[in-house]
Structures are given as structure tokens and as C-alpha cells.
């Protein structure tokens, strides 16, 4: 249960006890179960962030100090320093595990410092003995050696650095070796699953969710770069829909938007991609050679579209009507690709996407009005404005006409917000 719900429950407990609905013992047990209503999660998060940043600065500072006089040191001294840094960091991490295991700040800071010292030791030893200077090999070795820290120290900071590190590593590979990134992702996913099960509402879990989502998209683009030339927009439309489905199916109970990266990324990507495809020049480029795409590109597209269909089947009993328009985007884009097969000018596909973008905007506004959500209404209005502005660049319209349209749309913005605010205020007064 989130903090707002706990606060509301605690406000109701005295009245429920006074009316005899529940005995005082039950009220005490509820308070014991949910804990304090106003916890210090925000303070712990700030301390955690500063602790991790402090560990990063300390580690980088030590490396810079050593680098200043590195050339004057003998090989033996360099090796002793490299090993000494690693052993010292291990002792600090071990002490935290032994004496301060319950302290999140100490645990994250010690784990971050140890991960940095692992990388620094690898660099110092490699430079001392003139080992092969291969950045990709160094990154891979560093990440694999740091991987046990995720589970041993239970460190979200190390997990963030790990996912960023393997994503950077994937950018320097070509051919089948790029697919090894999914093995590296899989090695850390059990840790992430443990966070979702045990501390789903924690700020660290939310931050890690965002990092994993963003890194996944970068890794996907690198791993399948050979298949994203002409079919890439269709593939990404399916991928955004799948991400949105994940958020709706398994992460739909979060109390704030920032804790829902899957829904946010899927929604933003779907709307942005639909807007891009309203331009005729995009379809003209796609028509220049998409029939010559490799067979694996069609296979990847078919797999992702099949997953979208499966996700829609899982949602068949859900009552949320507002999610359907976004899940139809891959189907609309697929239909547009079929039209492009017969109309290589791209006119037909452009008309389909412009019509769907307009309908999508109206659906967003309607859903926002129905649920009394001003932010959703404004999103729909901004989508319509973006579509109008884009079309003004495509056609020759006088400045007077453009100005009148913008004034009308602006008045629509104000009117919609005023009406919704009054309705919402009246609804709250009735309660």
C-alpha cells in the first residue's frame, strides 16, 4: 500500500474503533503492519544519492592523485598500489556487511567504491604491464567482475553502473557478438526481480527501472541495427506497444508517474513515432527499398507484433478504455506499410497516419474529460497542436490563417481547462 493510502487509513481508524467496526487491537496491528505513515523515505534517498556521489568522487580522486606521480613509480610499487586499493575497498565493503548491513547508505556507498576500485585496479595493472589496450574487453571484464556485488552487497547503485557499462560495451561490437548483450542483461535481471518483489515502492527501484528501460532500448538498437533500416519504425512501434503493455499489466498500481517508466516510455514513444510518420517524406524514404530487407528483419517484426497481439489478449478483460488507441498503433502502421507496397508515393500511408493521429488526439481528450484528468486533456490538445503545426510546414497557408487557427486552439485549451476545473471542484464539493 502506498503512503497516501496508509495516511488515509490511519485517519479512518479512530472513527472505526469508536463505532465498534474494528477492535482497538486490530487498529494497533494495522499500524504495526504498515509502519509510520510519514516515513523519511525522501531523506534516505537524498542521503543515498550523496553517499554514492561521495564514493564516486573519492574513487576518482584517488585515481587522479596516483596518476600525477605514476610515471615515477616502479612496476612493483604500481602493482602494490593497485592491489592495495582493491584490498582496502574490499575491507571497507566487508566491514559494512558485518557491522552496518542494515544501513542502505553505507552499503550503497561501499559497493560503489569497491566497483570503482575494481575498474581502477584493472586499469593500473594493464597500464603497468602493457597489456592489450582493448576498451571493450576492459569494460566486459570490469562488469563481469562487478556483477557479484549486485547480489552480495544488494546494491542498486552497482546495478545502475552495471547496466550502463554493458550498454556502452554493446556499442562497440558487430555481428553475432552483439547478441551477447542479452546474456549480460539476463545475469542481472534476478536482482531486479528481487527488488520488485521486496521493495517495489522504493525510490531506488524506480530509478533502476528507468535505467534498465533506457539501456534496453539503446542495446536493442545496437543489437539489431542491421534490421532497422526500412522496417525499423514498424519494429519500434511494436516495441513501444510491448513496453506500454508491460506497464499496464504489471506496473499499473504505482502512486506516481515517475515510478512507471514502462508506461511512460511506451506512451511517449508511441505518440512520438506516430507523429513522425505523419510526414510524407518519411514514407517516401521507406518506399525506396524496404522490399529488399533481410528475411530476419521480417521475422523480428513478426515476433514483436505477435507479442503485441498476445498482450492485447491478456488485456481483454480490463476495463481501461484509454489504453486501446495506443495498442492499435502497430496495427495501423502495419496497414500503412501494406498500402505503401502498392502506393510507393507514400500519399496513402501519410493520409492514414494523419487521420489516426487526429483520432488518437480526440480519444486522449475524451478519456481525460471522462476521468476528470486535466493533464490528459492537455496532452491530447498538445498532440492536436503538434499535428496542426506540422501540416502548416507541409502546405502553403497564409500567416493570417495560421494565426487564426492558433488563437482558436489556444482558446480551446483555456476553455477545456476552465470547464474541467469547475467540474472537478463541483464533484469534490458533492463528496
Image: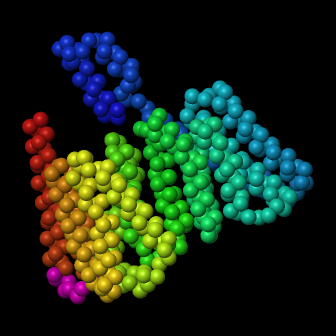
The x, y position of residue 334, in whole percent, is 33, 71
Q: Which picture quadrant has residue 155?
A: top right
Screen quadrant of the N terminus: top left
Q: Is residue 276 above or below residue 412?
A: below
The x, y position of residue 316, in whole percent, is 26, 50
Residue 174 visible (yes or no): yes
Report if residue 387 lies within the magenta region.
no
Screen quadrant of the C terminus: top left
- How many numbered marks, from 0 up? 0
The one of 290 and 298 positioned closer to us in this rendering: 298
- Residue lying at 38% horizontally and 51% vertically, measured from the top left: 246
The one of 329 and 394 positioned closer to us in this rendering: 329
Q: Is residue 330 above or below residue 165?
A: below
The x, y position of residue 289, in whole percent, is 44, 84
Q: Is residue 223 above or below residue 242?
A: below
User: In the image, which residues are magenta?
Assistant: 393-401
- Residue lying at 50% horizontally and 76% vertically, measured from the top left: 294
Answer left or right for 358 relative to 280. left
Amino acid at each position: 500500500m502506498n503512503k497516501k493510502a496508509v495516511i488515509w487509513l490511519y485517519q479512518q481508524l479512530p472513527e472505526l474503533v469508536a463505532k465498534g467496526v474494528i477492535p482497538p487491537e486490530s487498529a494497533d496491528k494495522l499500524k504495526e503492519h504498515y509502519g509510520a505513515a510519514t516515513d523519511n523515505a525522501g531523506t534516505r534517498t537524498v542521503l543515498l544519492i550523496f553517499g554514492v556521489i561521495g564514493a564516486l568522487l573519492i574513487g576518482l580522486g584517488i585515481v587522479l592523485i596516483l596518476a600525477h606521480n605514476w610515471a615515477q613509480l616502479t612496476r612493483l610499487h604500481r602493482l602494490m598500489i593497485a592491489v592495495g586499493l582493491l584490498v582496502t575497498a574490499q575491507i571497507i565493503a566487508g566491514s559494512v556487511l558485518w557491522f552496518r548491513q542494515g544501513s542502505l547508505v553505507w552499503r550503497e556507498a561501499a559497493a560503489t567504491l569497491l566497483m570503482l576500485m575494481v575498474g581502477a585496479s584493472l586499469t593500473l595493472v594493464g597500464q603497468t604491464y602493457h597489456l592489450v589496450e582493448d576498451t571493450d574487453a576492459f569494460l566486459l571484464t570490469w562488469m563481469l567482475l562487478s556483477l557479484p556485488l549486485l547480489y552480495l552487497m544488494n546494491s542498486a547503485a552497482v546495478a545502475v553502473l552495471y547496466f550502463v557499462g554493458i550498454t556502452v560495451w554493446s556499442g562497440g561490437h558487430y555481428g553475432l557478438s552483439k547478441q551477447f548483450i542479452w546474456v549480460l542483461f539476463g545475469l542481472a535481471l534476478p536482482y531486479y526481480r528481487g527488488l520488485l518483489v521486496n521493495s517495489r515502492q522504493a525510490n531506488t527501484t524506480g530509478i533502476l527501472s528507468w535505467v534498465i528501460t533506457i539501456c534496453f532500448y539503446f542495446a536493442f538498437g545496437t543489437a539489431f541495427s542491421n534490421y532497422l533500416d526500412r522496417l525499423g519504425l514498424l519494429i519500434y512501434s511494436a516495441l513501444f506497444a510491448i513496453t506500454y503493455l508491460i506497464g499496464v499489466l504489471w506496473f499499473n498500481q504505482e502512486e506516481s508517474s515517475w515510478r512507471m517508466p514502462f508506461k511512460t516510455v511506451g506512451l511517449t514513444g508511441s505518440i512520438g513515432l506516430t507523429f513522425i510518420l505523419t510526414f510524407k517524406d518519411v514514407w517516401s524514404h521507406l518506399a525506396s527499398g524496404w522490399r529488399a530487407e533481410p528475411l530476419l528483419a521480417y521475422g523480428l517484426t513478426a515476433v514483436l507484433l505477435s507479442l503485441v497481439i498476445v498482450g492485447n489478449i491478456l488485456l481483454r478483460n480490463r476495463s481501461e478504455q484509454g489504453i486501446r488507441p495506443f495498442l492499435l498503433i502497430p496495427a495501423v502502421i502495419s496497414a500503412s506499410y501494406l498500402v505503401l507496397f502498392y502506393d510507393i508515393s507514400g500519399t496513402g500511408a501519410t493520409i492514414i497516419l494523419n487521420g489516426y493521429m487526429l483520432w488518437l488526439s480526440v480519444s486522449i481528450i475524451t478519456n481525460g474529460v471522462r476521468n476528470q484528468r486535466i493533464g490528459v486533456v492537455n496532452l491530447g490538445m498538445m498532440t492536436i497542436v503538434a499535428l496542426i503545426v506540422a501540416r502548416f510546414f507541409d502546405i502553403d497557408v497564409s500567416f493570417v490563417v495560421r494565426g487564426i487557427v492558433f488563437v482558436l486552439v489556444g482558446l480551446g485549451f483555456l476553455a477545456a481547462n476552465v470547464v474541467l476545473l469547475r467540474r472537478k471542484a463541483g464533484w469534490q464539493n458533492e463528496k
